[in-house]
Image (cartoon, rainbow, N blue to C red):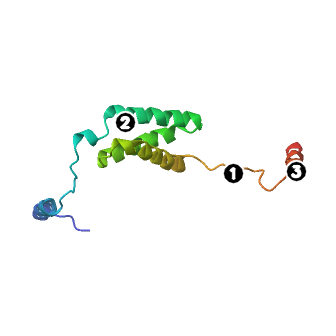
Amino acid sequence: MKFPGPLENQRLSFLLEKAITREAQMWKVNVRKMPSNQNVSPSQRDEVIQWLAKLKYQFNLYPETFALASSLLDRFLATVKAHPKYLSCIAISCFFLAAKTVEEDENSSTKGIGKRQFLWMFRI
């Protein structure tokens, strides 16, 4: 393996800087401008987070589910300027994705057997 010398390091640094400036010139981020009154306010976000916390307790889910749901919601709101009327739909979608990711599927061991068979196996 050949280790680069100082000239190779300078050349590599020059090429990287050139590529970064070319990328900055060519890559334009498409950010849509929306009126400020249509953005989700921090208080609206807090209300939705409290609602998600109530759902977490109501369905007896893991704390990680709530943490992931709130993280997904914050990431989405940081990326997309959402209208407040869609906030509950966005929040429940984040909650659903978090539950599908974190929560375990309940596999009942009693599927396919009757009550008598289950009690008989329990006594053994």
**Quarter placement of the N terminus:** bottom left
Q: Which residue is mark 2?
A: 45
**Quarter placement of the C terminus:** top right
Q: Earlier in the sequence, mark 3 or mark 1?
A: 1
Res 84 quadrant in image = top left
Q: Return the residue nearer the eye: 41 or 22.
A: 41
- 116 vs 86, left or right, is right
SS for dot 3: helix
Q: Earlier in the sequence, mark 2 or mark 1?
A: 2
Q: Which residue is mark 1?
A: 107
Q: x and y percent of residue 77 in the render?
A: 33, 44
Q: Which amino acid, mark 1?
A: Asn
Q: Earlier in the sequence, mark 3 or mark 2?
A: 2
Residue at 56% x, 33% y is 57
Q: Which amino acid, mark 3?
A: Gln
SS for dot 2: helix
Above or below — where is 34 with respect to 41?
below
Separation (CA) of disc 3 from disc 2: 51 Å
Residue at 51% x, 42% y is 65
Mark 3 against mark 2, which lies toward the viewer?
2
Q: x and y percent of residue 119 in the render?
A: 87, 45
Q: Which residue is mark 3?
A: 117
Res 14 quadrant in image = bottom left
Judge the density around disc 2: few (<14), some (14-19), many (≥20) Cα neighbours within 10 Å: some
Separation (CA) of disc 2 from disc 1: 35 Å
